[in-house]
Amino acid sequence: MSRLCPMAALAAALLCSPSARAEILAMANYESKPPEALKAFKHPVAGQTRQEGIAIIDVNPASPNYKKIVETVPLPP
């Protein structure tokens, strides 16, 4: 009987609470090309430096941010 009350309270809280919007996120590491590789392009972007980090991407098809990078975490070189 003592276990039933906490479980019933938890079930009631979950059923009565507003539905939570769950995010479905993915993480991908990225690395820009080194300056030597950028020289191979006909029109390289001037002033671009090498970057490395982790991109957090929204992969929830129902989300308005689907397939967009929602945050980046830069890593030290």
Image: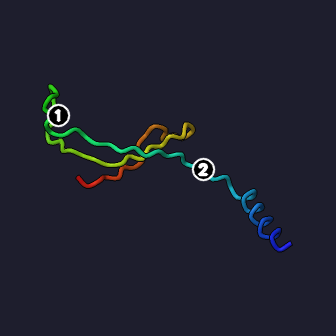
Relative side of 65 to 48, left or right: right
Q: Position of residue 59 (x, y in %)?
A: 50, 40
Q: Secondary structure at mark 1?
A: helix
Q: Position of residue 38 (x, y in %)?
A: 17, 34
Residue position for label 1? 37
Q: Position of residue 37 (x, y in %)?
A: 17, 34
Residue position for label 2? 21
Label 1 amino acid? Ala
The correct choice, above or below, for 63 with respect to 1 in the image is: above
Cβ atoms at labels 2 and 1 below 8 Å apart: no
Please tell me whether mark 2 or mark 1 is closer to you in this view: 1
Give the residue displayed 49% in from the left and 38% down from the top. 66
| View extreme (top): residue | 42
Label 2 amino acid? Arg
Give the residue displayed 32% in from the left and 43% down from the top. 30
Task: Assess disc 1: are there few (<14), some (14-19) or many (≥20) residues with their C-alpha within 10 Å of its C-alpha.
Answer: few
Mark 2 → mark 1, Cα distance in angstroms = 43 Å
